[in-house]
């Protein structure tokens, strides 16, 4: 029988009342929604029969990839702030 492990930092309950934590969770929710929509657009491109629909899906995908890049950049910045809360901020 193994002994229970102490909870690590990642296992702590999330405090959604904290505005920074709520913003961080919202970024991840937006990322997940974008990834799901991108998957659907890629399927439309692959299995679509109408050339106009395929072209529209391709254009929409390009715009959503830019949004995804923006969200991932914001997530990386938020993760750095979480890991180094006392770090100097350049403004």
Image (cartoon, rainbow, N blue to C red):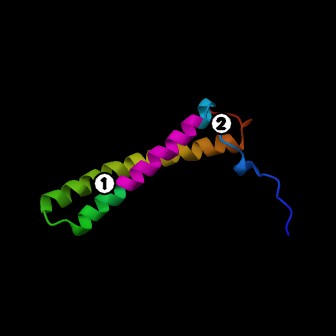
In which quadrant of the rendered view does residue 17 lie? top right
Q: Label 2: how many residues lie within 10 Å, few (<14), some (14-19) or many (20+)? A: few
Q: Residue 19: image x %, image y %?
A: 60, 30
Q: Residue 45: image x %, image y %?
A: 24, 64
For the C terminus, the quadrant is: top right
Residue holding disc 2 = 15
Q: Residue at x 72, y 42 (%)?
A: 84
Q: Is residue 87 magenta?
A: no
In which quadrant of the rendered view does residue 18 lie? top right
For the N terminus, the quadrant is: bottom right
* Predominant secondary structure, magenta span: helix
Element type where label 1 sits in the image:
helix
Find the distance from the CA under tag 1 to the CA under tag 2.
34 Å
Judging depth in this view, the residue of 62 and 19 nearest the camera is 19
Q: Is residue 67 left or right of residue 27?
A: left
Q: Is residue 4 left or right of residue 90?
A: right
Dot 1 or dot 2, earlier in sequence: 2
Residue holding disc 1 = 61
Numbered range of the magenta stretch: 22-37
């Amino acid at each position: 029988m193994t002994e229970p492990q102490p909870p690590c930092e990642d296992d702590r309950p999330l405090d959604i009342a904290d505005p920074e934590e709520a913003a961080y969770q919202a970024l991840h929710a937006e990322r997940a929604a974008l990834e799901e929509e991108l998957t659907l657009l890629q399927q439309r491109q692959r299995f679509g029969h109408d050339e106009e629909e395929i072209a529209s899906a391709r254009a929409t995908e390009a715009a959503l990839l830019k949004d995804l890049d923006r969200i991932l950049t914001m997530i990386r910045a938020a993760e750095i702030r979480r890991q180094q809360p006392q770090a100097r901020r350049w403004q």
